[in-house]
Structure formats: C-alpha cells, structure tokens
Amino acid sequence: MSLKNAKVLTISQSIQPFMDGPEEMAKVARQLPQGILESGNEIRVFMPKFGCINERRHQLHEVIRLSGMNLIINDTDHALLIKVASVPSARMQVYFIDNDEYFKRKADTHKADGTFYPDNDERALFFGRGVLETVRKLGWVPDIIHCHGWMTAFVPLYVRHHFADDPHFENTKLVFSVYDQKAEALDKDLMKKLVQEGFEKDVVKGLNKPTTDDLYKMGIGLSDAVVRASSKFSKGLETAVKGADKPVMAYTGEDDQVSAHAEFYQSILEEALV
C-alpha cells in the first residue's frame, strides 16, 4: 500500500537539526517528512522559532509575504512572523512561527534552571493558530495534519472548532503523535482564555486544572488517529491511548518509521473514502 500525491502537514514542537530535544520527537519530525516527500508526496513542515535556535547558523530568513498577521491571544494582539530554512542534505524546508514576546527568550519550553515557562499555554496557542493561518495563506490544502508533542495539541482544537466551517480543512485528517514527555502544570486560567477565544466550555472542560498530559488527552480525543511515538508512557497517557476509540499506530523503530507511517496515513485516507 503506497502513499502517493498526498499533502502532509507536519507540525512539531522540535525538529533536528534546529533543535535536539526532546530527542525522539526532534528525530522523527526530521526524518519522517523527508521520507514522505521522497516517496512522491507533498509536505509542509512547521515548528516554533524558539530563541535558542541559531538563525545565522541555520540560515533562517523571514517570509515577508506570509508575515504581518496579528493573532489575539488572551485579549492581546501579537504579531505573527514566519521564517523559513532549508534542511541541509534534504530537499526539505521548515517554516518557523515567531513572535518577539513568546519566542525571543534564549530557551525552549523551560528556563535554564529547568523551570517550565508559565506562559507555555499561550505560546502553544499562538503556535497552533499561527501554523493554520499560515497554511491558509499559502492556499495549500493538507490531506493529513500530523501533530507531534503536547505543544501542538491546540491544532486539532482549532481545526475542529475555530475552523469547523472553513472549507480549507474540511476533508483534512488529523493524526496525533504521543510522546513520553514529563507532565508539567499549565496556567490555571487556560480554560478561561479558551472560552475568551470563543471555544465552548464543554469542549475544553478537561482543562480545569491543566497539565501537558491533559493537552495530550485533548489532542487524542479530537484527532482521527493516534501514533504511539514512544515505547512507554506514564500511566495516565497509557490509559488515554488505550482508550482511544480510533486507529492507533503501534510504536515503530527507526528503520521502519517512514513505511509504517505511509501505510497508516494511507489507511486513514482510504477509510475516509468509504
């Protein structure tokens, strides 16, 4: 079963060589899109432009025609900047979502002392919304959106609710990869912010005392299919993955990564045609 001429949007919290951690995710999100591209499909790849990414070394430059939108997060206007870089040794480009307030600090999701940033919920909202607005601006309609990591969990929420009536995403299938990441507490006002964004309370009710694991659970619930991207999970995530009433792809080693995903994508697209 080969995947051909499909349009696959990869959205990841981390991608090599721009970032190394979490290692498992950074590696998969780097190799998988390239493999999908090389087997005759179209891809677009997005990640956050964390301040620890060396723009000069990786030759990032701003895409002026895509930048310049403003997104309102928590009642405040934030300028959306889009940058792009090529992956050396691959015919693959990566787009970066940037904003001075959210992504200028010289770290990713944790401070140098290991503290989790208190505004990571808003950074994740800005990132997810920014990717979808940019893809619409590109006029590129994905068949599959594949999300990697808790920071991408708002993407399924936006697609299912904020963009529910938007023809751009109406036939798009959502795949969510779950990784073994340490659960961190998020801002207790997250639910309030989402209601302010226009989401119904019952849609986001699982985010009452939110952790990153709760974002994973929300992403699992709103996606069409789930990928076990780590060999083991915490008890809570294991229960959520096991209880998912949708196709779940088993954990796959590095060698079979691309072929297993291509088959999985194909089966989801074929299911949609039935």
Image (cartoon, rainbow, N blue to C red):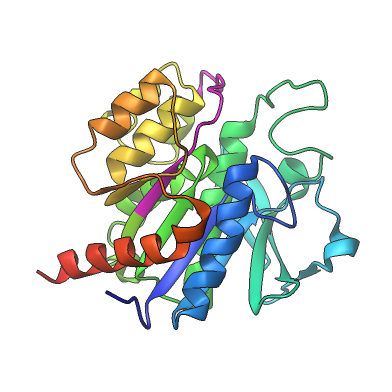
Q: Picture quarter containing residue 46?
A: bottom right
Q: Which quadrant of the figure contains the N terminus?
A: bottom left
Q: Residue at x 54, y 30 (%)?
A: 181
Q: Nearer the viewer, residue 50 or 130?
A: 50
Query: Is residue 49 depicted above or below 239 in this figure?
Result: below
Q: Which quadrant of the figure contains the C terminus?
A: bottom left
Is 181 in the magenta? yes
Q: Residue at x 81, y 20 (%)?
A: 113
Query: Is residue 191 depicted above or below 46 in this figure?
Result: above
Q: Which residue appears farthest toward the right when viewing the image?
A: 56
Query: Is residue 175 depicted above or below 44 in this figure?
Result: above
Q: Picture quarter containing residue 237?
A: top left
Residue 269 in sight: yes
Question: Which residues lie in the magenta part?
Answer: 175-190
Indicate left or right for 29 with 114 as reference: left
Q: Residue at x 31, y 61 (%)?
A: 264
Is 236 in the magenta? no
Q: Majority secondary structure of the magenta segment?
A: loop
Q: Residue at x 75, y 22 (%)?
A: 114
Q: Nearer the viewer, residue 46 or 2?
A: 2
Where is residue 149 drawn, in percent x and y?
51, 42
Residue 66 in sight: no
Indicate left or right for 36 with 62 as reference: left
Where is residue 241 drawn, in percent x and y?
31, 34
Where is residue 198 drawn, in percent x and y?
38, 41
Where is residue 54 drawn, in percent x and y?
86, 55
